[in-house]
Image (tube, rainbow, N blue to C red):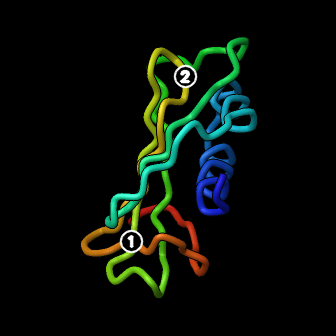
Amino acid sequence: MEQLDRDILDWIAEKTADAALTAQIRSVTVAKRDYMRTGFFVYFDVPNDAALVPGEINAICPHIDSPDLADGGGCSLFLRGGRLHYLEIYARGGFFPQSLERYELRIAD
């Protein structure tokens, strides 16, 4: 898992009050990571015995500030059937570098 992916997931885990979501974030592995020039789709494998996340949970996702992103970036975490499915990481307009090393995560305005 790339450092950006792990940092985003850790940030989300810190902000949620749902134990099942936090547990899945801590145990998830990456099945596939697709680079799309404007961002990434990071698909997950979740252990079969993981507790399911309730359907009403909507994870708070961070805004990404970086000197390498003209307008910053964002992300969205998607679940399917109570399990982490994928993380979308995207530029807010323009190009997202294939490797982003300088960034800060914060609550979006």
- Residue with the mark numbered 1: 96
The answer to whether residue 64 is above or below residue 61 is below
> In the rendering, at what x and y percent does residue 66 appear?
49, 80
> In the rendering, at what x and y percent does residue 93 appear?
25, 72
**Closest to the observer: 14 or 3?**
3
The answer to whether residue 94 is above or below residue 81 is below
> In the rendering, at what x and y percent does residue 5 appear?
59, 55
> In the rendering, at what x and y percent does residue 11 appear?
64, 54
Task: Residue type at mark 1: give it.
Answer: Phe
- Residue with the mark numbered 2: 83
Extreme-left residue of the structure? 93
Mark closer to the chain start, 1 or 2: 2
Q: Measure how far apart labels 1 and 2 are at the Cα level.
A: 27 Å
Task: Residue type at mark 2: give it.
Answer: Arg
**Closest to the observer: 42 or 32?**
32
Q: Residues within 10 Å of mark 2 (few under 14, many from 20)?
A: many
Q: Contact (CB < 8 A) between labels 1 and 2?
A: no
Is residue 21 found left or right of 33 in the rendered image?
right
- Identify the residue shown where x is 70% and y is 27%: 19
- Identify the residue shown where x is 48% and y is 68%: 64
Q: Residues within 10 Å of mark 1 (few under 14, many from 20)?
A: many
Tag of residue 6: none
The secondary element bearing badge 1 is classed as loop
- Identify the residue shown where x is 32% and y is 74%: 95
Is residue 91 found left or right of 21 in the rendered image?
left
Quadrant of the image for the C terminus?
A: bottom left
**Closest to the observer: 45 or 19?**
45
- Identify the residue shown where x is 42% and y is 63%: 108
